[in-house]
Amino acid sequence: MTNDQLKVFLKVAEHQSFTQAGEALFLTQPAISLQVKSLEKDLGVPLFERTGKKILLTEAGRKLLPMARSITLQMEEAREAVLPLGKTPQGHLRLGASMTIGTYLLPRLLAGFRKDHPRITTSLAVQNTHQILHDLKASEIDLGLIEGEPTKTQGLSLDRTFFDHDHLVLIDSAAHPLAPETGSLSLSLLQKLPFIGRETGSGTRQVIERELLEKGLPPDYFDVVMTVDNPEAIKELVALGAGLAFISSLCLKPEEADRIRTVPVEGFAPVRNLWIFVPQKKLSPAADLFLQRLVRSRGLA
């Protein structure tokens, strides 16, 4: 009795079809039949019986089913347990990150991680906070990095670790300024100027609305002339004089100083936390390695 035979047995039992099991395992129907016959010969009992077009488990097959599942699961757990001990860890890392983290913080970390672990492949989905939490719940990603304070995390079985602080700054065009070119800007004056906001579900939008509410102001206090879901597009619009916008200080580059300037706002300096969200289950070796890298990179170890 081999692990491959048990995998074939489980797929046939799941699909009640040799053909569909073969398609799922990328094997031909004769190859599936041969594996099943070899397993039945080894055990000395038939495991399946045909009823019309369906293939059903015999009594022996029904008894074998839970044990086959347990054996294959233990084989996978054994493989994952020893994998980190190898000289070259391998696997696939699935990350989800909100816009600022995914665009401006993770690239350098991922480049270093790739250099140290060349046999680990990575996929990165840059999404808003709401979508990342959804993907974590659906087990479509291993780790989520989020800006701000998610409002709906109940029932998601997630742990979170503080990553860093992120300061939001108001930006204006250097060539076509809308705000006074000297001194700070009051909130009342800012309210009268065109404002470029972020989309619903954005961590940036959430923290700005929270700060406004804390000051007794409505979340739609600013005159939003457009909403944009990309920081680079926002910077370009601001540089062209289309409006003012709050953006993470992490998004600003020294070479942009001749096109974009920051404007201090009186009594309004939003700061948000950056979080690492982790499912409450055992991480894959690749995800665990990258989580350790994240913690070390921000001086949290």
Image (spheres, rainbow, N blue to C red):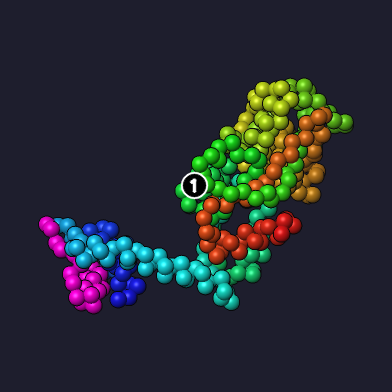
Crowding around mark 1 (Cα neighbors within 10 Å: few <14, some 14 to 19, many 20+) is some
Residue at 71% x, 36% y is 246
* Residue 264, percent from left and from top: 82, 34
Q: Which residues are magenta?
A: 29-52
SS type, badge 1: helix
Q: Is residue 220 magenta?
A: no
Q: Establish if 245 lies above or below 188.
A: below
Q: Is residue 35 magenta?
A: yes
The residue under the point 46% across, 67% down is: 77
Q: Residue 234: x and y, percent? A: 67, 39
Image vertical order of residue 178 relative to residue 283, above or below: above
Which residue is located at x 65 percent, y 43 percent?
147
Report whether residue 243 is seen. Answer: no
Residue 231: where, in percent of width, then height? 66, 42
Residue at image mark 1: 137
User: Eyeballing the image, is 12 above or below 178?
Assistant: below
Q: Does residue 96 appear left or right of residue 25 in this picture? A: right
- Expressed as whole percent of the image width and height from the top left, the position of residue 301 reads 71, 59
Q: Main secondary structure of the magenta part?
A: helix
Q: Classify residue 175 by image quadrant.
A: top right
Q: As shown in the figure, which amino acid type bears the numbered disc 1?
A: Lys
